[in-house]
Image: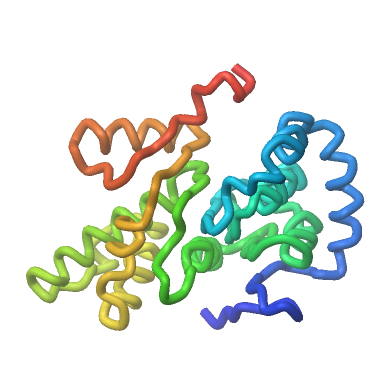
Amino acid sequence: MALSVDKTSGGREYKVKDMSQADFGRLEIDLAEVEMPGLMACRTEFGPSQPFKGAKITGSLHMTIQTAVLIETLTALGAEVRWCSCNIFSTQDHAAAVIARDSASVFAWKGETLQEYWWCTEKSLDWGAGGGPDLIVDDGGDVTMLIHEGVKAEEAYEKTGKVPDPTSSDNAEFQIVLTIIKDGLTANPKKYTKMKERLVGVSEETTTGVKRLYQMQASGTLLFPAINVNDSVTKSK
């Protein structure tokens, strides 16, 4: 699968469908900001103190105009952001284009194949030599799962030299995940372990992801702190 990363004139990485839609995306963001007073109030209150200065945030959440307002709130508070969508069909291409142009690294387009989806997910975690993100905004738990499976594979590789076998699963999507981990293992055998050690924690947005987190907590396999945003008062309960 020959996908390559594009770069803005300033050097920020991205992969979206159509950068010419960015101006339309900006108009839509201007409208959406009026409907999202909570985030706008955060910018006013916390913008001057830059609480996220130096923080690297990876997001896997529907790349829509509303998510664009969230991303630009995070960057307004000082964060550096890399983003992908948590769904192969939910990206609004004009939203992805404007964020890629103006605000953050984004890897998302409407109608991704499963291979492309997981390529984008991996790219959202690619912070270069310094390791991974400090914080994750997850929806459905895919980024969380990739790191956990990666750590598991790295531990097995260190002990036995064994690499993941994608054919060991009959789930086509999980085969892709195992292939991604396997392909990177020999070149960077501590990639996901370094991410786990750096991570402050993850917020999880949806019921499925939260359920998975509670199961991992119960079995003692959860590698970093998690916040259950799904059941918070800010979600329309």
* Depth order, front residue of 45/170: 45
Residue 167 image offset from top left, x and y in percent: 26, 67
Question: Residue shown at 91%/51% (left/top)?
Answer: 27
**Residue 170 appears in view:** no
Q: Residue pushed farthest front?
A: 49
**In this orientation, which residue lies closer to the viewer: 203 or 172?**
203
* Above or below for 97 versus 210: below
Q: Is residue 175 rendered to the left or right of residue 32?
A: left
The image shows residue 50 at horizontal and vertical percentages of 63, 48
Residue at figure coordinates x 72%, y 65% from the top left: 100
The residue lying toward the viewer, choosing from 181 and 128, is 128
Q: In which quarter of the image is residue 177?
A: bottom left
Q: Where is residue 89? Give x, y as percent.
A: 65, 52
Count of marks placed on residues: 0
The quarter of the image holding the C terminus is top right
Residue 224's spot in the image, x, y percent? 32, 45
Quick check: can you spot residue 23? yes
Q: In this view, does 48 lie above or below 121?
A: above
Q: Is residue 14 left or right of residue 212?
A: right
How was this image coloured? Answer: rainbow
Name the side, left or right, on which 43 lies relative to 114.
right
